[in-house]
């Protein structure tokens, strides 16, 4: 124990003598650890918000769409546009499947602006669905009431607004019972959804839900362009019976193929996705980020390590006489090895600690100036520590070995 | 001190250095025996192999051939770790150029062998202080080597050699870098140490210095000419 403390004090004496040199040496490690900590904590923050969002959307939803969830690579847009549109009838048919709890049609579009007296909100999403909308989407009507079957059947001009819309348009009064105007149609507000928060910096509460029957009246014009025909139609959100998600997917596929009159040799003309799949897609994206970090970390740590090795070799050469003297008074090879190894480890750790501090600050800064919320966790700090210690050992062992193996007399003779 | 009367014994010791491809025979078959409480001076012309010999005797270097025994054990059979222990506890070495660590104080320099012996901090300081007081440097303990005179440095180096109470002390021209008065003071310390029962081997050019020793070994061209 006295030995360890002795070695550490010894190392610090050496660093004090070469302050600038020591700092420059650790720069590589500082940069490496800073980048790793900053990027890791940003990805972690992203992961957390995505995970919590996906959970809050509702567990184990299945999505039926005309177009693929992610357009990977060049796709024939024309082919997708020419597929049959999905319809509310499809949702109804799917609801009747034994493995399905409930299915809803969903269709949306962005309204440019919605005004109420002298207040306004922009980029509000208008979503058409049916009375099961809040059940499928894990939404909760906080004040007022939810849709009823009658609202849908009678094409009532009613709507439920997200909390963002509520607080911006009606800062002082209750929105329930008030009327909004969209594209010349009056909508009576019957309820307000409970807040869900932001996802990737975007509010999830800036929307208004209306019966799809009424939606069709507001947005009645035909979809002309390829893009419009491919992407702007109905999709169906399906909530399977718990534990029957695989069966539900099979049944939905079979049903839809029948409804579209596809013979067995034809491919599907619709896409089925799951939240699981969504999560996987997301994870694939972050995996690329992880690979990039590993590469950055590896490069900068190797550069930092070589810097440390270099400075330690210089240090061994400079202190050859010292090594000789120490050996002459009884230092063993191991004593000398540990002395220099402690030095390189401490050097690397100092770099690591500075890097951790910079990394955390950088992550904080990004959190402040951008919607990305960084989450620094303990394991990252341990990782930063561990990595720099490993670099110190790995790149310090060769110079330390060299110091330890010096012959005492030759070392003493060294000028 | 030790019961064994022969502290060390070298048999037919050769040391060959290589300058490129040319061999330099520094020692060519030296036989030597050192008994307990002896005071020996090794003399000889420059280049005769004195330093080479004392380094081998002090286990700082190994012979090219021949056998060297410390207390009846063959030194070449010791491991690196055992050799370090021997240099630490069994042998005290004093160099001509003092060889102190420049960044350490006199006290820390003296305590260094104790550090490698695994002695606790408080005891290290106590022992080092005790010996520095005895050698007359009680008021110089916090000084670094560059703040000390040559004689003082050499006394620090001697204290360092003595601090682990070694069985034998080797000194390679301990007065070589000192004026004659300071040199004489150092020699007095050695006389005193011998009286106390220490075993001392010094290397010197100086007839006066050698005069203190009871036994003089003359080296010439790597051979013992006179014992
Ligand atoms: N590392 C070495 N490489 C090559 N030759 C060496 C080496 N060390 C010593 N020698 C040679 O060995 C011979 C003996 O050297 P040594 O240092 O033992 O002499 P010395 O008697 O101590 O001389 P001095 O009185 O000058 O100190 C000399 O010829 C010297 O040049
Ligand atoms: Mg010499």
Image (spheres, coloured by chain):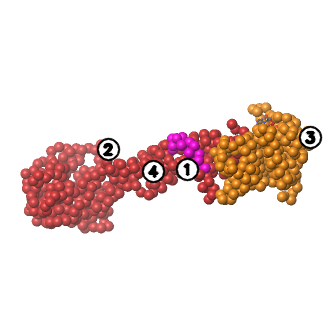
Chain colours: A red, B orange
Are the residues under marks 1 and 3 on the same chain? Answer: no
Graded by Cα atoms within 10 Å as few (under 14), some (14 to 19) or many (20 or more), the crowding at tag 3 reads few
Graded by Cα atoms within 10 Å as few (under 14), some (14 to 19) or many (20 or more), the crowding at tag 2 reads few
Of the residues tagged 3 and 4, which is closer to the observer? 3
Are the residues under marks 3 and 2 on the same chain? Answer: no
Secondary structure state at the residue bearing disc 1: helix
| Cβ atoms at labels 2 and 1 below 8 Å apart | no
Along the line of sight, the residue nearer the viewer: A271 or A179: A179
Question: Where residue B21 sits in the image (x, y, percent)?
Answer: 77, 32
Query: In the rendered view, does A371 fall on the left or right side of B168?
Result: left
Residue range in magenta is A10-26
Residue tagged by mark 4? A356
Residue tagged by mark 3? B226
Question: Where residue B114 sits in the image (x, y, percent)?
Answer: 70, 55
| Cβ atoms at labels 4 and 2 below 8 Å apart | no
Classify A252 as above or below A112.
below
* Mark 3 vs mark 4, CA separation in Å: 69 Å
Residue A346 is tagged as 1
Residue A73 is tagged as 2
Q: Determine the chain carrying the residue at label 2.
A: A
Q: Determine the chain carrying the residue at label 1.
A: A
């Amino acid at each position: 124990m006295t030995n360890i403390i002795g070695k550490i004090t010894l190392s610090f004496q050496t660093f004090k003598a070469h302050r600038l040199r020591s700092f420059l040496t650790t720069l590589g490690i500082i940069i490496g650890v800073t980048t790793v900590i900053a990027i890791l904590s940003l990805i972690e923050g992203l992961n957390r918000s995505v995970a919590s969002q996906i959970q809050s959307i509702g567990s184990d939803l299945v999505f039926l769409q005309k177009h693929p969830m992610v357009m990977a690579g060049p796709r024939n847009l024309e082919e997708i546009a020419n597929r049959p549109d999905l319809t509310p009838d499809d949702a109804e048919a799917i609801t009747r499947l034994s493995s399905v709890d409930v299915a809803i049609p969903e269709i949306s579009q962005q309204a440019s602006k919605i005004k109420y007296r002298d207040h306004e909100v922009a980029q509000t999403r208008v979503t058409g669905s049916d009375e099961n909308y809040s059940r499928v989407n894990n939404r909760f009507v906080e004040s007022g009431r939810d849709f009823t079957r009658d609202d849908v059947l009678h094409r009532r001009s009613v709507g439920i607004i997200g909390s963002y819309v509520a607080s911006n348009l009606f800062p002082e009064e209750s929105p329930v019972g008030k009327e909004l105007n969209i594209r010349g149609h009056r909508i009576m507000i019957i309820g307000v959804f409970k807040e869900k928060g932001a996802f990737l910096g975007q509010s999830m509460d800036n929307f208004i839900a209306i019966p799809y029957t009424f939606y069709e009246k507001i947005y009645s014009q035909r979809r002309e362009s390829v893009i419009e025909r491919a992407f702007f139609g109905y999709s169906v959100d399906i909530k399977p019976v718990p534990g029957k998600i695989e069966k539900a997917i099979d049944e939905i596929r079979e049903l839809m193929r029948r409804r579209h009159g596809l013979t067995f040799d034809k491919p599907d003309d619709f896409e089925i996705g799951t939240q699981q799949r969504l999560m996987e897609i997301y994870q694939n994206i972050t995996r690329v980020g992880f690979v990039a970090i590993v590469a950055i970390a590896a490069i900068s740590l190797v550069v930092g390590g070589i810097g440390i090795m270099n400075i330690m070799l210089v240090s061994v050469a400079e202190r050859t006489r010292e090594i000789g003297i120490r050996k002459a008074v009884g230092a063993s090879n191991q004593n000398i090895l540990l002395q220099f190894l402690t030095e390189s480890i401490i050097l690397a750790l100092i770099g690591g600690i500075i890097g951790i501090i910079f990394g955390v600050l950088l992550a904080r800064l990004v959190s402040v100036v951008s919607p990305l919320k960084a989450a620094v966790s303990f394991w990252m700090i341990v990782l930063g520590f561990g990595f720099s210690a490993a670099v110190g050992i790995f790149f310090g062992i060769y110079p330390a070995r060299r110091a330890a193996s010096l012959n005492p007399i030759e070392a003493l003779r060294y000028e | 001190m030790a019961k064994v009367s022969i502290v060390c014994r070298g048999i037919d010791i050769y040391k060959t250095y290589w300058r490129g491809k040319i061999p330099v025979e520094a020692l060519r078959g030296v036989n030597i025996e050192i008994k307990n409480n002896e005071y020996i001076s090794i003399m000889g012309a420059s280049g005769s192999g004195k330093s080479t010999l004392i380094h081998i005797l002090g286990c700082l270097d190994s012979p090219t051939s021949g056998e060297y025994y410390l207390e009846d054990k063959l030194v070449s059979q010791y491991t690196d770790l055992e050799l370090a222990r021997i240099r630490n506890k069994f042998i005290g070495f004093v160099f001509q150029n003092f060889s102190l660590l420049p960044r350490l104080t006199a006290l820390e320099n003296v305590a260094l062998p104790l550090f490698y012996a695994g002695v606790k901090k408080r005891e290290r300081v106590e022992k080092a202080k005790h010996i520095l007081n005895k050698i007359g440097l009680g008021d110089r303990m916090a000084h670094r080597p560059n703040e000390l005179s040559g004689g003082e440095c050499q006394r620090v180096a001697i204290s360092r050699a003595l601090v682990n109470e070694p069985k034998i002390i080797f000194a390679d021209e301990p007065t070589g870098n000192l004026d004659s008065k300071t040199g004489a003071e150092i020699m007095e310390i050695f006389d005193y140490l011998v009286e106390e029962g220490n075993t001392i081997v010094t290397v010197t050019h100086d007839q006066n210095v050698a005069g203190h020793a009871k036994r003089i070994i003359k080296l010439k061209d790597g051979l013992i000419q006179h014992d």
